[in-house]
Image (cartoon, rainbow, N blue to C red):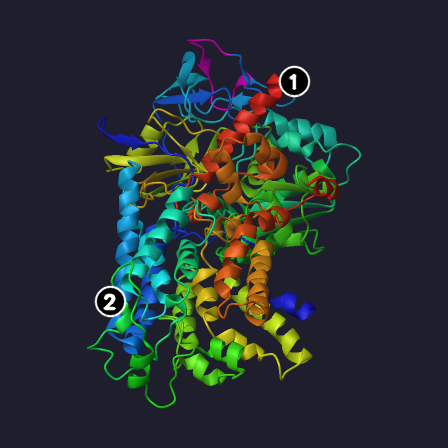
Amino acid sequence: MQLFKLFRKKTFPHGIHPEEYKAETNAKPTRRLPFAPEIIVPLSQSIGKPAKAIVFKGQQVTRGEIIAEADGFMSVPIHAPVTGSIKAIENVPGAKGGKQTAIIITTALSSGQSVMDSGLQQDYQSLSRKELIQAVKNTGIVGLGGAAFPTHVKMSIPDDRKIHTILINGCECEPFLTTDHRLMLEKIQQLILGIRIAMKCVDAPKAIIGVEDNKLDVLAAIQPYLPDDQSIRIEAVETKYPQGAEKMLAYSLLGVEIPSGGLPSEIGLAVFNVATLAEIGALLPTGRGLIERIITITGDDLEKSGNYLAPIGTSIRYLLDYAGFTGTEVELILGGPMMGISASSLDIPITKGTGGLLVLDKRASEADDISPCIKCSQCLQACPINLNPSELGLLAAARKYDVMEESYHLNDCFECGACSYVCPSNIPLVQHFRIAKTLNRERHLQNG
Amino acid sequence: MAKSSLKIDLRTSPYIRKAHSVPQIMRNVVYALLPLAAYAIYQFGISALALLCTTVLASMATEALFNYLSHKKQTLNNYSAVVTGLLLGMTLPAGFPLWMGGVASFTAIALGKTLFGGLGFNVFNPALVGRAFIQAAFPVSITTWTPALASNRFIEFIPSSLAIPFMKPLATADWSAQVTIDGFTGATPLALMKFQGIFTDSYDLFLGTVSGSTGETSSLLILVCGLYLMWRKMLDWRIPAAVLFGTALTASFFYYLDPSQYPSPTFMLFSGGLMFAAVFMASDMVASPVTPLGIFVFGCLVGFLTVIIRLFGGLTEAVMYAILFANAATPLIESYTQPRIFGARKKAQEKS
C-alpha cells in the first residue's frame, strides 16, 4: 500500500483536464507596465466593507500614500498606486456590472514615481502575533488568488482552534494564467519570508507549498531556499482543475476533507495563495502598501502577451493598448477562463484580486443552443465535491431553489465551472446555481 | 488604441468548454450501430435492410410530425430519432412485417418520447416502449424467427416482410424449411433452451452464427462497437458492466444450484438480446440513473430481472421488460443513492 502511494500522484477525485494554454506566457519574465495617464481605484476591492476615502478632489497624493482607510475589521486600507492629483471621487462602471465608487487619480507625468517611505522598519520576529496581523492589515493585502478575502481576517484564528499546518496554494489551476508561476521563480525570498510571517500569525509549526506538476521548474528553484528542518516543504500535485481550490488542495496534500460549510481552521489548516504571501514578504518589513500586482495579459489577438507588473487601477483599455491588441469582437475576462468575470467596458480597472486579463476571440467556446439534459452523468464525474449538478440543473429549471439547498447541498458548490465545462447539452449549470444561491440568500433575509 | 468600434461579448464563466454535443454523441451511436446493421443485412438479406430502413424512417417521420403539430423546433438534427429507429429495428426478427415495424416506430416515438416532452424527458427507453407495444399487439410475428444466411436472402424477401397492413402475414414455416442450410434452425437459442432444453454452444452465440433478432446475434460485434463508443467517452461503461455483472451473478447462483436444469452464466450472457441490451439499451442515458451507486444498482437490477424472467417467466426474451422495469425504478434508485458530498458532516448525513 505504501509502495502504491509512492507512485500515485497527489490529487483529488473527479475534476477536469482543460487545455492549459500556459506556454504562451509562462516563459516570459515579468515586466513593469508604464503608468497609465489616469488611474481608477475602486473603494471596494475585496470581500467585506469598502474602504473610506480620506482624500479630496484636487489633492496631491504620493505613490504609496493611504488614500482610503479600512472601515472596520472586514476591510483593508487602499494606497495610492501613482503620484498625482485626485481628479474625482465618483461612480464608474464596475467589473460585475453596475456602478462602483472609485478614486480617480491623474498621474503626474513629471514625477519620478518613487514610493513614499513609510519610515517603518518591521522585523516580524520582534512583533507579537497581534501586532503582526495588524501590520498585515496595514499593507492592504487581500487574497490575491482571485477571491480577494482580507488576509488579516483569515489570519485571525479563533483562540480555541489550533493550526498545525499552513498550505500555500501555488497550483494556479486556471488555464492561461501564469502569474503565480513567474512569481514563484522571481520572488522566492519574499515568498519564504511571507510564509514565515504567516506561520507566526496563525502560530503554525509547518507549511507546505503545493504546486501543480506542470511547474516542476518551480520545485527545483524553491528547494534550495527551504529550511533544513522540514518546517517548510514543497510538494507537486497533479495538474488538474480545480486543484487550487482550498478543499481540493488540502485533500491532495494531506488526504483530509475540509468539512462542508466549515473553514479550514476547523481541521487545523490555514490556506493562503503564493502571491498573497510573497506580497506580504515584500511589503511588510518596510511598512508599505499594496499598490501593484502581477497580471497575465493573454489570449487571442495580442502582439505582446505576457506577465506585467501593473499599478492597481490601470484600465483594461490601457492594458490592451500596451499589449498590442488587434481584435474587433472579443470577450474580455478578468481572471481565468473558468471562474473569471466578463468585463463589459474597457474602462474597468484591475483591482487587487485581478490575476489576469484574458482576451478570447477564436478560442471562446461557441454559443451553441442549450438542449435538454440527457442525464449523461458527465457533470457528476466532474464535480470535485460530489454534487449532483444534473439534478440541481433540473431543479433550477423548475425553480425549486429551496430543494436545491436543502436536499442537494447547493451551498457546497463553489462555482468552479467543471460541470458546465463538460455538459454536452450546453446547460449553463454554474449560472443556474449562482442565481439560485442569490435568490435563496434574499429569501432568507426576508424571512429573517 | 483599442478601437472604439470594438464589440465586447458578455457571458458568464466558464468561457471555455470541451464537451461532445448531444448531436455528436447521437451521431456516434449511429456510427457504432452501423456495423451491426451491416452484419444483420449480411445474415438476413434485404428483409433486414428494408426493416431497418422502415423503422428509422418511420421514427424520423413521427418525430417530425409531432414537432410540427406542437409547433416545436425540429429536432431531427440531433439524431436521437435515428438512434431509436435503429435500436428498435435491431431487436425485431428479420422477417417482421414492415408495416408492423412502422407501427412500432410510431409507438416508440409518440408514446415513448414525445408524450413525455421529447429527448431528455423520457422515462423509458423509447425503442423498448415501441417493442413492448408490438410484443403485446403482434405476439406471433414478433416471435417468428427465420433462419440466418438463407441462400436467396439478397434477392428475395422473407414472405412475411411484405404483409399487407392489417392482414395476417404469410406463414414462414415452409419458406424456412426450403432455405435452411444444415445446422441452422429458426428457433432461437433461448427458445431452444426454454422449450426443448437444448443449450446452444456459447462459442456460436459469441460469434453470432445463430438465429435471432436482426441486430442481436453477434455478441462479439456488439462488444466491439460498444468499445468504440466507450473509447470516445460517449457510452458509460459502468452500465453495461453492471448489467453483465448482475446477469452473471444471478445466473451463477441458479447454475450452481442445479447445472442440469439451469443454463450456464456464459449462455445467459451471450444469448438473446442481452449483450445488445446491456451495451445499447440499458445504457440509454436519459432513462438510467446518474449517481455512481445508482448506476450499479440499476445494472444489477436489469441483470437479475432478466435471468428471473428468462428462467421462470412465460417469455423467452426477458431483457426488454427487465430494462423497462428498471427504467421505471430509476427515480427511486436515484433518490436513495445520492452521492456523499465532499466533507460531509455526520449530522448532515443523518438529516438527508
| Residue B237 in view of the camera | no
Q: Residue at x 72, y 55 (%)?
A: A229
- Pick out the residue farthest to the front: B168
Q: Which residue is mark 2?
A: B162
Q: How many marks?
A: 2
Secondary structure under tag 1 reads loop
- Pick out the residue farthest to the top: A57
Circle 2 residues within 10 Å: few <14, some 14–19, many ≥20: some
Q: Which residue is mark 1?
A: A448
Q: Percent x, y for residue A228?
A: 69, 56
Closer to us: A314 or A360: A360
Circle 1 residues within 10 Å: few <14, some 14–19, many ≥20: few
Q: Residue at x 36, y 31 (%)?
A: A34
Specify the quadrant of the image occupied by residue A426.
Answer: top left
Three-letter code for the amino acid on which mark 2 is drawn: Leu
Q: Is residue A245 above or below residue B301?
A: above
Query: Relative to residue A237, is residue B204 drawn left or right?
Result: left
Are discs 1 and 2 less than 8 Å apart at CB? no
Q: Percent x, y for residue B296?
A: 58, 60
Query: Relative to residue B329, is residue B68 drawn left or right?
Result: left
The kind of secondary structure the magenta stretch mainly shows is loop
Query: Relative to residue A41, is residue B328 drawn left or right?
Result: right
The chain holding disc 1 is A
Q: Residue at x 42, y 64 (%)?
A: B139
Closer to us: A178 or A116: A178
- Pick out the residue farthest to the left: B155
Q: CA distance from mark 1 to mark 2?
A: 72 Å
